[in-house]
Amino acid sequence: MRRTSGRRFALSLVLSLAALGTGRAHAIGYLVPDQPGVEPLAIRHHRVGVSVRERVAETRVEQTFYNHTGQVLQATYIFPVPEGAAVSGFAMWVGGRRQEGELLDAGQARAIYEAIVARVRDPGLVEHMGGRLFRARVFPIQPNSEQRVEIRFSQTLEYQDSVIHYRYPLHTSGPATQTLEDFTFTADIISRTPIRAVYSPTHPLAVSRPDEHRALVGFETHQAVLDADLDLYYAVQDRDVGLSLLTHQVPGEDGYFLAMIAPRAEIAEQEIAAKEVVFVFDTSGSMAGDKLARAQAALDYMLARLNPADRFQVIRFSTDVEPLFGGGMTVPATPENVVRARGFAHHFVAAGGTAIHGALREGLAHQRPSTAARLIVFLTDGMPTVGETEPAHIVRDAALWAQGSRVYVFGVGDDVNTTFLDTIARRTGGVGDYFADGSEMERRLSAFYDRVAYPIFTDLELSMPGADVYDVYPRDLGHLYRGSQLMVVGRYRGGGPARVTLAGRLGPTREATSFAYPVTLPPQEARNAFLPRIWATRKIGFLLDSIRLEGERPDLRRDVVALAQRFGIVTPYTSYLVVEQDAVPPGLIPQVTAPTPETTATYDFEDSAVDGDLLPPQGQTLDVRPRAPRPSRSGGGGSSGGSRGAAAPSAPEAEAARDFEQFAQARVQPAPTMAAPAPQPAPSGGAGESGRRLARRLREMRETERTEEGQVLRYVAGRAFRRVEGMWVDPGYRRSLHTLHVRPGSVGWIALLRERPDLRPIFALGDRVAVAIDGHRAIIVDPSAPEGVSEAQVASFLSGD
């Protein structure tokens, strides 16, 4: 930045309290030019550092703005202060020098917010209304230069039932939606009570645990999209295995819960449970070259990390099946046995066919009496070609042979049938993962073993005696490992005191152990509103996986559609949707193409609304590829603010649609019910890149811990809004409702936000929104609406006159 010595510099600071109610304050800073027609300046860097000491958090925010214009600007810096926080410092760099600010009292937040929102017409500012505001006037900001700002605030964090919650409000829109360069978040948490689970439902945080009482958290991304607040939860408990509960329940509905389970951070080697690991590796001719070399490297990595108390076996298969140690039994992981195994793997040669059935029999059938956790690490790059080749028979036999062993299947290359292998994994309590090439396989297979190398608490079961809980996911909790944590979601009816029991086998002795945790299931809880969507995503993933692996049933299909419609989740079934004419505002004409003669239904993400009764007939193929964007009626493209004109769907919707392309091909019809085990129809489909994407997508849904916001579907205020030709439409909207039309930024629009603070997160979706406020009235926000709606008209409308 150029020096501005001799130039005028004016800086005034205001800390004010709005009179609009509590609202939902946000903490992202804006630099808003005073010149008409100039949008808020883009953010080049946004860096956040948080220090938490015994629930007291100090947050330091550093933002660098960029003046992209060719003029000298005078601007106002506004920073909505989170509820309960106190500003402890402010600094700004002008002319390259750090300037300390001054804090003055004033009661003008309401007027400031309303004036800026009305002038800038940035919907993202709407949610700031109602909180406290920190303001600084800045001059001069030189053309094509940077302006750096630093602000610090402290707050006491919310604590409930051993869980502490920190939120860095971040959601915005307009030019500040995406940083030009980096967004960085770090947190250093120290607690006298040992820290157990550390969790974010919004961002994939990296967590390091130096000891029991400290956690280091980090997140960094380039050109970050600032479309979701950053939520961080951590649990504190002085127990070997911590369990803390988050809940959410709205009146008239069953509640939701999330159980966060985590062991101590510091686990001695003698506390690690022994395990048995059988490595079953494909050495058929198709594994030649890089795939085999990478498989050998991954196997060598895992062998080197066996624990002294472990037992293991290595099995190589191609046309024949060859166990390293005779009799097929596992042997102790002594240094001598490990050296022998690494030498055995080093001499693998790729040749012959693929005897999957025989390899599974060798790995599963020879089991010694033991309570140790038994894992089968099964790697292949193709379908069975030797011996039993019928997939249904192989799945049946593997399930019979498993007897408590969990088969973790890994497939590499385009010839792998992910549906077939995932069926084996599911029937034995394992999971599957798939790779395009050898380098990806080596990296992720090694990472998998790092996660499972040190079991602490195995064969877990969770129950709540005396409480009415249901729809708990995951169904099979598996094992708890050192450094890991487990998230369990479910529903509950009623409320009141309850007890969570976590049972399993603990430590090296594998002694049956249970822990009891007193909890409260509240009859009403407004916090943790992210829980319903996480629960719904997991349940949909489980249902879709059941359809893919076991066949479609009307009840499963119906449940998927109902959940997807309510929570705004993309699925293969809700990708073909027909619009009820009454369910969209006048003037919106969605285009849905009817099924072609080949019974392929095409779907336009941008132009659709939900009618659960109008779905493709059972058995049709679903084409869920998004179309190219259609030109807008006004001649312009779509925008993040919701301007008229369709835009091509973006992540996560377009990514989900691509991942679901092969879902229909992977489905199979259910087999008739039989008293005795019988071969199921052979799973079909699931090969190639599309098969890998589908398998990975469904696994992510089943295991999800975070919510995602899209540009076509948004779950806001408990409703799944769908973008229809650039307008966000509430599923409860109907044309027959008494409707008030308002222009964003107008007097009537401001009056609505003042009288109905609950509309703020909905209006923040964009400048084109249709929302039902009850069973009789609706509001449509649109730039084409009349300008002259008065405060008196708004009051009359809201009162029902």
Image (cartoon, rainbow, N blue to C red):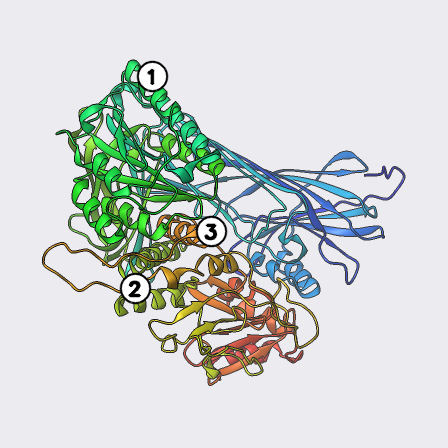
Mark 1 secondary-structure assignment: helix
Name the mark nearer the viewer: 1 or 2.
Answer: 1
- Residue behind mark 2: 253
Q: What residue appears at the point 24 percent right and 32 percent down from the top-left corner? A: 457
Residue 689 badge = 3
Q: In this view, does 61 lie to the left or right of 723?
A: right
Does 369 sit above or below residue 420?
Answer: above
Q: What residue appears at the point 81 percent right and 37 percent down from the top-left corner? A: 95
Q: Where is residue 692 in the image (x, y as percent from the top left)?
A: 43, 50
Q: Which numbered disc, 3 or 1, marks the residue that appears first in the sequence?
A: 1
Q: Is residue 485 visible?
A: yes
Q: Is residue 500 visible?
A: no
- Residue behind mark 1: 339
Q: In this view, does 351 lie to the left or right of 206?
A: left
627 and 745: which one is in front?
A: 627
User: Which amino acid type is marked by label 1?
Assistant: Val
Mark 2 residue crowding within 10 angstroms, few (<14) / some (14–19) / many (20+): few
Q: Which numbered disc, 2 or 3, marks the residue that appears first in the sequence?
A: 2
The Cα–Cα distance between marks 3 and 1, rounded to whole angstroms, is: 36 Å
